[in-house]
Amino acid sequence: MKTVYDLRGVHPGASDDAVKAAFRAAAKSHHPDINPGDPKALLRFRRIAAAHAVLRDPKRRAAYDRRLAAYNRRLALERQRIRSARMHIIISGAIYGVVGMTLAIGFLSVGRNFSASIMAGKSGNGDGARTDRDGGRAIGAAR
């Protein structure tokens, strides 16, 4: 965003004499009579004149400086919010990626051990016989 200071070519702490000198120099270079073939010269000259109207009046200049400072604070807060949101996305993605990889590796190792035990005909109780659900006798075992 171009400020009135940018249009005039002065810094915010410039004196009144510096503001007048900058206005005269800009007005001479952008005046429509000096640039008759340039259709945008009148628009540039009007913007420079409007910027001069703000900067030459101390009350209007102070009000403009307050609005500009508030705008810059809001802009800084918005940039900080965006950086924070981006960092949240990056960290969340990394965490979900690590958790997903951990689960995938765990399922692969459990699946490999489970399929190996089925292929070998082993059960989880160590004696080779399967038990019923309530922990009673082995199914098919001798009584």
Image: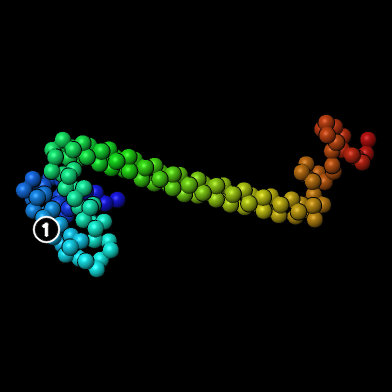
Instruction: Residue 85: give x, y in percent of width and height.
Output: 44, 44
Q: Is residue 76 left or right of residue 136?
A: left
The residue shown at (31%, 43%) is 76
Instruction: Residue 8: give x, y in percent of width and height.
Output: 17, 53
Q: Is residue 30 left or right of residue 118?
A: left
In this view of the protein, which residue sits in the foreground, 121 or 52?
Answer: 52
In this view of the protein, which residue sits in the foreground, 139 or 54?
Answer: 54
> Which residue is denoted by mark 1 in the rendering?
25
Q: Is residue 38 above or below residue 121?
A: below
Instruction: Residue 13: give x, y in percent of width and height.
Output: 12, 45
Q: Is residue 7 visible?
A: no
How has the structure been colored for display? rainbow
The residue type indicated by label 1 comes to Ala
In this view of the protein, which residue sits in the foreground, 120 or 90?
Answer: 90
**Secondary-structure class at tag 1:** helix
In this view of the protein, which residue sits in the foreground, 126 or 36?
Answer: 36
Q: Is residue 83 above or below residue 58?
A: below
Q: Quadrant of the C terminus?
A: top right
The residue shown at (16%, 48%) is 52
The residue shown at (71%, 52%) is 111
